[in-house]
Image (cartoon, helix red, strand yellow):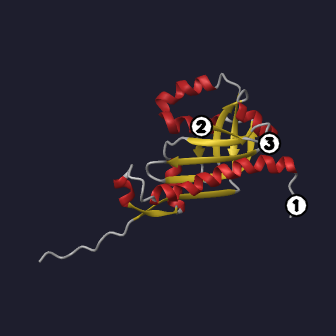
């Protein structure tokens, strides 16, 4: 096992604790007896369980925001909401070269992403190293735009994006977790007498 330098350790720890805190809070939010903010939701949830591959793919195909985490020059997490496309093995994000997230990833390619549905208690977390593609980006960028805006609204938006200094971020996750609510068992039907 390789020892981490103090600088690397300082960069990893904030992201790790941020993600662990987020993951640790979900069961508390679902099961807290003292929390009465969403009693109807809590009553229909029997806890959380891992997604099947089919559930994960369906969830990621929907129009959802993602939040990506990169590490700034001090090693602190920098979070950015983004739109994305998932092709079954990688996440794709279109960004300009002028953004902080681009500069962060040029310096340190580690990235994490969370895609969630707060009210439905669904979540996908993924992490790994981002690949930055500077060429042949428009086919996948079109898929991102059309997913969120459709072709009719997406074409003018895509035309504006093509005037910008864009790249494609590709994340093939090294680690991925996905979960959703476990339905409560339904009572057995009683025959009419």
At x 28% / y 74%, what residue is drawn? 188
Question: Could you say where residue 189 lies in the image, as x and y percent from the top left?
Answer: 24, 73
How much space separates mark 1 and mark 2, taking CA atoms? 34 Å
* Mark 2, residue position: 82
Which numbered marker is on residue 108? 3
**Label located before the other in sequence (2 or 3):** 2
* Labels 1 and 2 touching (C-beta < 8 A): no
Left or right of 87? Residue 59 is: left
Q: Residue at x 11, y 77 (%)?
A: 193
Which dot marks residue 2? 1
| Callout 1: SS | loop
Q: Determine the image quadrant of residue 83.
A: top right
Q: Earlier in the sequence, mark 3 or mark 1?
A: 1
Distance between the alpha carbons at the discs numbered 2 and 3 = 19 Å
State if disc 1 and disc 3 touch (CB < 8 Å).
no
Q: Alpha-carbon neighbours of circle 1 within 10 Å: few (<14), some, or many (≥20)?
A: few
Q: Nearer the viewer, residue 163 or 1?
A: 1
Q: Where in the figure is residue 31, as x and y percent of width and height?
A: 45, 60
Determine the secondary structure under disc 2. strand
Camera-side mark, 1 or 2: 1
* Farthest front residue in view: 34
Instruction: Answer with left or right where residue 114 lies relative to residue 2.
Output: left
Few, some or many residues within 10 Å of mark 2 (<14, 14–19, 20+):
some
Q: Is residue 152 above or below residue 70?
A: above
Image height of 29 relative to 153, above or below: below
**Residue 135 in view:** no
The residue closer to the viewer here, 130 or 157, is 130
């Amino acid at each position: 096992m390789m020892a981490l330098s103090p600088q690397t350790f300082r960069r990893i720890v904030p992201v790790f604790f941020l993600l662990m805190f987020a993951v640790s809070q979900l069961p508390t939010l679902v099961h807290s007896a003292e929390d009465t903010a969403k009693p109807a939701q809590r009553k229909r949830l029997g806890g959380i369980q891992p997604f099947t591959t089919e559930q994960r793919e369906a969830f990621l195909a929907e129009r959802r925001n993602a939040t990506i985490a990169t590490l700034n020059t001090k090693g602190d997490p920098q979070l950015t909401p983004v739109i994305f496309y998932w092709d079954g093995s990688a996440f794709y994000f279109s960004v300009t070269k002028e953004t902080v997230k681009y500069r962060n990833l040029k310096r340190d390619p580690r990235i994490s992403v969370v895609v969630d549905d707060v009210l439905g208690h669904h979540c996908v977390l993924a992490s790994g190293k981002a690949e930055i593609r500077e060429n042949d980006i428009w086919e996948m960028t079109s898929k991102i735009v059309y997913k969120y805006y459709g072709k009719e609204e997406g074409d003018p938006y895509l035309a504006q994006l093509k005037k910008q200094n864009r790249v494609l971020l590709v994340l093939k996750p090294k680690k991925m977790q996905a979960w959703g609510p476990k339905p409560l068992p339904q009572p057995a039907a009683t025959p009419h007498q």
